[in-house]
Image: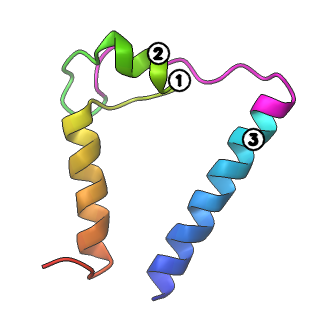
Amino acid sequence: MDRAQAHEEEMRSDALATFERRAHGHPPRVSAEFCSVCDEPIPTVRRVTLPGVQTCVDCQHDIEKKHVFDWGMAE
């Protein structure tokens, strides 16, 4: 439960930071051209849609899936 609450707080902080950057006109982080995990190219559509993205879809899915297992919410 504590990990879930900590993760929720982290997500809230990230969302507030994103809001602050947008509200004050700070440019978003630059998207990576290659995944920081597997070094495969990140499609242009993903990079444009998600400014600051650093991972490909498959690696991001694995990262998110791992966090679910860490919380003990999945088999």
Q: Is residue 58 above or below residue 61?
A: above
Residue 25: x %, y % from top left: 82, 22
Q: Secondary structure at mark 1?
A: loop
Quarter assignment of residue 56: top left
Q: Secondary structure at mark 2?
A: helix
Q: Nearer the viewer, residue 6 or 18?
A: 18
Residue 75: x %, y % from top left: 12, 79
Name the residue type under label 2: Val
The residue under label 2 is 48
In the rendered image, the residue lying farthest to the right is 24
The residue under label 1 is 51
Label 3, label 1: how far apart the Cα atoms are: 13 Å
Does residue 32 appear in the picture of this structure?
no
Quadrant containing the N terminus is bottom left
- Residue stretch in magenta: 22-35
Label disc, if present, on residue 19 of the rendered structure: 3
